[in-house]
């Protein structure tokens, strides 16, 4: 929840980018392939954006890999996605460490298979000391779920007498959400042409700039990322102030 518009002349770069990777299914269907082939191709685009973001000095990249609602998909698609997560985790951790990328997961992981949970914990542990890009993968995540779990935890504190109701503030609640300790996303990117947030980081994206790309996720490459960054650079972020205040013509 940091709002900083102090350095008005530096290139405006997002510290944190959040991405909804939409369009894998359509990418595959257009080629006469099963939808799951699109998810496999999507993994290649994930690899590319992780490396391009790290090269461009982005601090945190949060990817929506699987929403709380994605369990409603056909059973076979869910099962292919789960095995894709597992194999990708196992095969990519070495590369993440080599690129100094710290991986963490957000979402309710209790529902995943034990094998997958073990691999998630292992990957988080293996990359814990990496100090470059923070890669956050949202898996079985929903923005409303995040707010509810934070509210439950804060209620427990109040009930236990460790907090007073008046201690419940935006900051104390934020500290119990999944992205506590990381800056809010500056830029949200959604591929695939739809213009929705789809219950992603709804608490954290109160002031996030929204960018919608028409290309499908497997086609989202370095050049597409640069288009999004160039668009972001032109945005004036006001955080409730007037445009004149932001450019410094009027006293804040
Ligand atoms: C949405 O496209 C995509 C998903 C629900 C899955 C995203 C998963 C990956 C990109 C693969 C693995 C990711 C990691 C981090 C290992 P869609 O299927 O809704 O596409 P459609 O709108 O064309 O049907």
Image (cartoon, grey):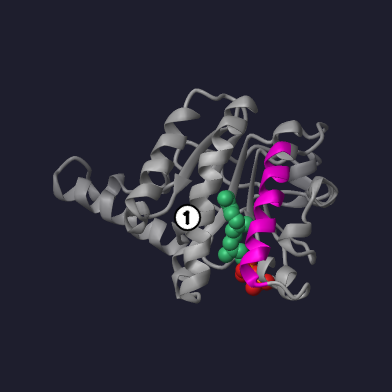
**Residue 78 point in image, percent of width and height:** 48, 67
At x 51%, y 40%, the residue is: 90
At x 71%, y 72%, the residue is: 33
- State whether residue 94 is above or below residue 147: above
Residue 188 lies left or right of residue 144; in this view the side is right
Question: Dot 1: within a 10 Å radius of its alpha carbon, few (fewer than 14), some, or many (20 or more) residues?
Answer: many
Q: Nearer the viewer, residue 243 or 190?
A: 190
Q: Does the magenta stretch include residue 39?
A: yes
- State whether residue 197 is above or below residue 237: below
The quarter holding residue 194 reads bottom right
- As drawn, the residue found furthest toward the left would be 160
Residue 224 lies left or right of residue 169; in this view the side is right
**Residue 73 point in image, percent of width and height:** 50, 75
At x 49%, y 23%, the residue is: 129
Q: Mark 1: is the Cβ under 8 angstroms from ligand 1?
A: yes
Image-quarter location of ligand 1: bottom right
Residue position for label 1: 139
**Residue 145 point in image, percent of width and height:** 39, 61
Task: Mark yes or no: residue 173 visible.
Answer: no
At x 56%, y 40%, the residue is: 91
Magenta: main secondary structure:
helix
The quarter holding residue 122 reads top left
Task: Mark yes or no: residue 53 visible.
Answer: yes
Q: Does the magenta stretch include residue 197?
A: no
Please provide the residue range marked out in magenta: 34-51
Residue 203 lies left or right of residue 108; in this view the side is right
Quadrant showing the C terminus: top right
**Residue 30 point in image, percent of width and height:** 77, 75
């Amino acid at each position: 929840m940091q709002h900083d518009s102090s350095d008005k002349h530096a290139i405006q770069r997002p510290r944190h980018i959040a991405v909804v990777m939409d369009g894998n299914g359509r990418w595959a269907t257009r080629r006469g392939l099963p939808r799951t082939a699109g998810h496999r191709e999507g993994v290649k685009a994930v690899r590319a954006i992780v490396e391009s973001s790290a090269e461009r000095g982005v601090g945190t990249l949060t990817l929506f890999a699987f929403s709380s609602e994605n369990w409603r998909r056909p059973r076979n698609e869910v099962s292919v996605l789960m095995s894709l997560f597992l194999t990708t985790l196992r095969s990519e951790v070495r590369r993440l460490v080599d690129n100094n990328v710290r991986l963490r997961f957000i979402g309710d992981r209790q529902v995943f298979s034990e094998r997958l949970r073990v691999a998630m914990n292992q990957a988080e542990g293996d990359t814990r000391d990496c100090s470059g890009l923070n890669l956050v993968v949202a898996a079985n995540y929903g923005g409303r779920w995040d707010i509810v779990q934070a509210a439950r935890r804060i209620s427990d504190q109040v009930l236990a007498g460790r907090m007073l109701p008046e201690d419940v503030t935006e900051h104390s609640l934020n500290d119990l959400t999944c992205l506590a300790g990381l800056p809010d996303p500056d830029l949200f990117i959604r591929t695939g042409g739809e213009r929705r947030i789809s219950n992603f980081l709804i608490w954290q994206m109160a002031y996030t700039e929204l960018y919608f790309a028409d290309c499908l996720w497997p086609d989202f490459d370095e050049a597409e990322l640069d288009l999004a960054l160039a668009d972001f650079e032109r945005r004036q972020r006001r955080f409730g102030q007037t445009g004149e205040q932001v450019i410094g013509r009027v006293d804040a």
